[in-house]
Image: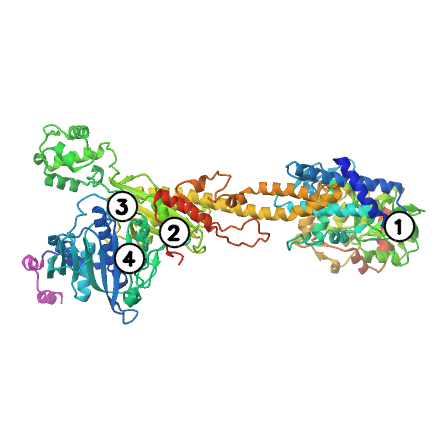
Amino acid sequence: MAKKVTKKKVVKKVPQRAPTTTTNKVTIRPKSANAAKRDKQTAVKLEALAEGIVTSSLSGREPKFEVPIRGPSNTKWLKSKGILQMGPSTSTRQLFNLGQARKFMQTLLHSKSVDELLVADKTLSLRGMFYKSLHTIENTKEKTFDDQTESDGILEDLEVSLGSLREELHIFAKKRGTMVGNITVIDNGDHINCAKMGSGGYAIPSICEPEVIQFKDVKADFILHVEKDTVWQRFNEDRFWEQHNCILTEGSGQPTRGVRRMLHRLNKEYNLPVYCLLDCDPWGHYIYSVIKQGSISLAFESKRLAIPDAKYIGIRSIDYERCGLTDDVKIELNDRDIKRAKQIAAYPWFADNKQWQKEIKKMLTNGFKMEVESLITKDISYVTEEYVPARLKAKDWLG
Amino acid sequence: MAAKKTTKRTRADAESMATKQRDISVSEFFAKNRHLLGFDNPRKALLTTVKEAVDNSLDACEEASILPDVEVKIEEITAPPNATKPGRYRVTITDNGPGIVRKQVENIFGRLLYGSKFHRLKMSRGQQGIGISAAGMYGLMTTGKPMVITTRPNKNKPAHHLELAMDTTKNKPEVTIDIETDDFRPGTGTRVAIEMEAKFFRGKGSVETYLEQTAISNPHCEITFIPPDKANENPDLAESANEIAKDSNGIVRTQEFSDRIVYPRTVNELPPETEEIKPHPYGVELGTFLTMLNKTEQKQLSGFFKNEFCRVPPSIVTTITKEASSKGNSFSGQSWVKTIEPSGAEKIYTSLQNAKLRSPPTDCLSPIGVQQMLAGLLKGVKAEFYTASTRKPAVYRGNPFQIEAAIAFGGNLPGDQQSRIIRYANRVPLLHQQSACSAFKSVVDTSWKNYGMQQPRGGLPVGPLVVMIHMASVWVPFTSESKDAIADYDEIRKEMQLALQECGRKLGQYIRRRQRMKRDAQKRDVFERYIGEISKACNHLTGTDTQELYDALLKQARRRTEIADAQLDDEGNFIKDDHGRLAKSDDVIILEDLDTPPESSTSEDKPVLKKKRVAKKTSKKRTTKKSAKAASGLFGG
């Protein structure tokens, strides 16, 4: 039966693909052999998922599939590798379970949409996927998805249950994050010299896989990653990356997978150390944690994203005294901050790190948090001319 | 000053006081304490009068093996001038009973505490024999009009027509008119007419409620009620020819005509005759025992025990006389009753109380019966679930008694109010002093939360529920002469609770099942919504035929939510998973299902009454059990 099915599928797919390739041949580069092979694999996985459901349905068994659990309970801290990894636990998604029926249906809708993307050889954003699978169920007033959040969660489920990355599903996220520095990036064939990006910088794409992005002329010595755009602008204007021969990146808060993949590749492929300049608050600490060892929800991707030797150079809780800051820069820790800080301190990957325990404890005793911008009270360019160079020189960072 | 006062004061001595000391007539006592008999206020007076008369009629009919036909007519002579003052009414109760022989008429209607029921232990509605004469006395006191009695004890002879006043000081009747008349219904029967100050009303605690509840517990009698507004109706408009018709479900319901309300007879068999029993020693106190020894016509102890008591066989007599014997004062079955000294009698009494005696016989009890109770509720309460239970007879203070309970749930009953309790003692509805009644307490003490009902702490359950409790006994222990509440004996309360729990368990089963059905219907609704989408997606991915897959999944969805189907595939509304146990058992009737049928795709609840099935179910019960089937808007309206 499976044979028959695949045959049918091929027949069906050919006419669909034909027009897309002919009309777009001019603008879209032909797919690399590697990418074609990868798409084929994804298609097979999707088919296997559906096949399992069909088989059990027709034989009167309950249709179901396994979804690895994405959560703290199924996240393992690999101390030797310094990264978070997803554990083996899975949850069963059943159709005939009131709490799961809708998700079951949504997962299949997205599987179908992904398959269509593979056939058309196009990619869609997360929001695009939401619209792709969105419609009103026949004879009812119920929509297949209430909002994009619902759709995003299902896509992550699909990723983990297929064991395919988002890129492999032809889905990308919104661009976020900027980069500038002594490096040339080959993005989909275009050569981009990141040292000549003006005041705007090069927007880091959502998909930074070797098939799409290659590097050339990597002259920088290290990477400075800052938390947000405002700080990045300060460094860029002061040409910090030129003076210190580095790559300057920013992730607009919690860095996306694209930014993290970019940092990871530069770190792994060119041995560039990554230094992070983040706010002195639990959220800044967690950004560092995600960059360094991966996040809980994307633990299955840690291997491709985590940078275990990333360093945290500031802002430190001792900086209030060390830099002689005024009381004005203090932002009082609220209950949520305190709760979150304690939570972070208890994560196994922080628990046996004495430096970090001390750092968080100090912040809690201070009772306030500080943003990177607080250094502006000293001088407009204090952070670029004094703070970061001094830290780098003294190798004063947290690991 | 104190001295002055003493001199002024006329000193009473024993002699002068003695001139004022005299007998108090029972009737005089009750004339002053009429609340003890249920004549506290004009509203209640009407009810008490009707109640006493109807109870007596039913008792008399049953004793004479006549299917009772009772007509209650209330005429308004003077309307109440304002809300606080009573009006004047004439209450007339006519029955088809055996009638009363001429010489007993005065005694029965004109004397308090005269009757056949007080001196025997037999299950009957009336007990003390004060009721109807008290009503006559009340009428006489408030209006000065004598009671009018017409009775025909022999169907071939004319009826007696008497007017009866009462001399309360002497507890003696005074006959003012005594004639023979042919102006009376054919056959035997009795009619009593009393004019009194009263207030007519409807609703809770009214004559109408009483009659409706009586009809529920006595499906073998037919009651016709002519309230004032109907009594004054133009007789030309009367639809007296109209027959009692069955409704669309084949259930005979209470019918209201322009000139009367009829509670139809739905069972053509009298309840089984109850046996009179002798007192059981455990229920007899020492004083009573001594009196019995004095009064007995028996010569020897063995005969005394044999004829005055139940459950004292010769072997026990031997044992207890032996035990009571002491040196120089020995007893045996052959001892002469007259020779026994009080001290000896006390010894015999003590050993009698210590002896292990069998429980009194229980053939003296006539419970309403599960089927009759169900039928009664069926016609009186528009609900969807009915169940009833009859306990085995039990004993309190040597008196055998039997408890029955029934409940009706759901349907048109109000869901946000306290449950309604209807109480019966020997088939007589109890309408007042609910909270003082053992039945009420037993309902409160039952934890209805276990059965899926809401119940505030120490209160009645809240929800669409009617609870019916019946106590049958040779001697119902009322808390007062007005017979409104059953006294709270532990044995009685325990039996009541057990009966309620039996019903409650069935109710809980039903409620849980109903919830499960609802849940499953919702579930199926959800599943069916999604499998179309899933089939299409799978078709895209694997090429499997959409329809084939859809059908397979639909089949599975239906199978997995089959409980929701249960009410669809069988007339009995029963459920596969309990193999119909609930609905098939004899003590449960499930009428209609208000659940959403699973076919509807919206989740809005649309009650669908499955009347067709109902009719079939109930008709089956009717033919096999001949139970009642009339119904009225008694509780729902």
What is the crowding at mark 4: few (fewer than 14 residues within 10 Å), some, or many (at least 20)? many
* Residue stretch in magenta: B1-21
Q: Chain of mark 4?
A: B
Identity of the amino acid at label 4? Thr
Residue beneath the point at 89% across and 54% down: A240
- Residue position marked by numbered label 2 in the rendering: B251
**Residue farthest to the front, as pictured:** B241
Tell me where residue B628 appears, x and y as whole percent. Answer: 34, 48
**Residue farthest to the right, as pictured:** A217
Residue A88 appearing in the image: yes
Find out whether the residues at labels 3 and 1 contact each other: C-beta distance under 8 Å.
Answer: no
The answer to which of A294 and A327 lies nearer the viewer is A294
Tell me where residue B364 appears, x and y as whole percent. Answer: 24, 40
Q: CA distance from mark 3 to mark 1?
A: 96 Å
What is the crowding at mark 1: few (fewer than 14 residues within 10 Å), some, or many (at least 20)? few
Tell me where residue B440 appears, x and y as whole percent. Answer: 35, 50
* Rendered image: mark on residue B270: 3
- Residue position marked by numbered label 1 in the rendering: A22
Of badges 2 and 3, the one in the foreground is 2
Q: CA distance from mark 1 to mark 2?
A: 78 Å
Q: Quadrant of residue B543?
A: top right
What is the crowding at mark 3: few (fewer than 14 residues within 10 Å), some, or many (at least 20)? some
Residue beneath the point at 13% across and 33% down: B303
Q: Is residue A256 left or right of residue B382?
A: right
Q: Is residue B298 left or right of residue A204?
A: left
Q: Chain of mark 2?
A: B
* The C terminus of chain B, quarter of image: bottom left
Q: Is residue A74 above or below residue B428?
A: above
Element type at mark 3 = loop
- Residue position marked by numbered label 4 in the rendering: B224
